[in-house]
Amino acid sequence: MHQSMHRTGDLPAQTPVVSEERKVTVDIAGYDFSPRDLTVEAGATVTWLNRDGVPHDATEAEKSWTTETLRQGESRAIEFGLPGRYEYFCTIHPAMQARITVQ
């Protein structure tokens, strides 16, 4: 049970998402980020919404930004003003990893 709760196995494949929207939502569900690979334009706001029954966060690999802990149903938004590639993960469940590319 513990292993399945923390998604240590392979995650299902996801198609990378390229969005021209100014506001984009990343769902947190099933111990996974969706989309896991997101490209947005500079100035876009990305909102993480926790749909799981356990707390999660989204924290940039070098800890330059974080959503802080999100409980079920909570969300947090971050605006991405500068182009770059941002790798992030859940500090509570480090196997949960994703990236945002800002163009």
Image (cartoon, rainbow, N blue to C red):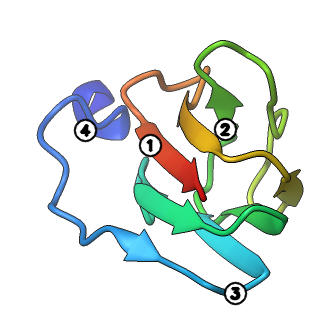
Which element type, helix, strand or loop, lies under badge 2?
A: loop
User: Counting other residues with Cα less than 10 Å from the Cα at mark 2, is it few (<14), some (14-19), or many (20 or more)?
Assistant: many
**Among all residues in the image, which is located at the extreme top?**
62
Foreground mark, 4 or 3, reads 3
Determine which residue is flagged by label 2.
Answer: 58
- x, y (%) of residue 13? 15, 62
Which element type, helix, strand or loop, lies under badge 4?
A: helix
Determine which residue is flagged by label 1.
Answer: 98
- x, y (%) of residue 11? 19, 49
Q: Are marks 2 and 1 in contact (CB under 8 Å)?
A: yes
* Amino acid type shown at disc 4: Ser
Q: Quadrant of residue 67?
A: top right
- x, y (%) of residue 69? 81, 35
* Amino acid type shown at disc 2: Ala
Foreground mark, 2 or 3, reads 3
Q: Of marks 4 and 1, which one's residue comes earlier in the chain?
A: 4
Tell me the quarter of the image containing the N terminus.
top left
Q: Nearer the viewer, residue 66 or 8?
A: 66
Question: Which residue is at 25% across, 38% downward?
Answer: 4
Which element type, helix, strand or loop, lies under badge 1?
A: strand
Q: Of marks 2 and 3, which one's residue comes earlier in the chain?
A: 3
User: Counting other residues with Cα less than 10 Å from the Cα at mark 3, is it few (<14), some (14-19), or many (20 or more)?
Assistant: few
Q: As drawn, is 75 to the left or to the right of 94?
A: right
Determine which residue is flagged by label 3.
Answer: 21
Label at residue 4: 4
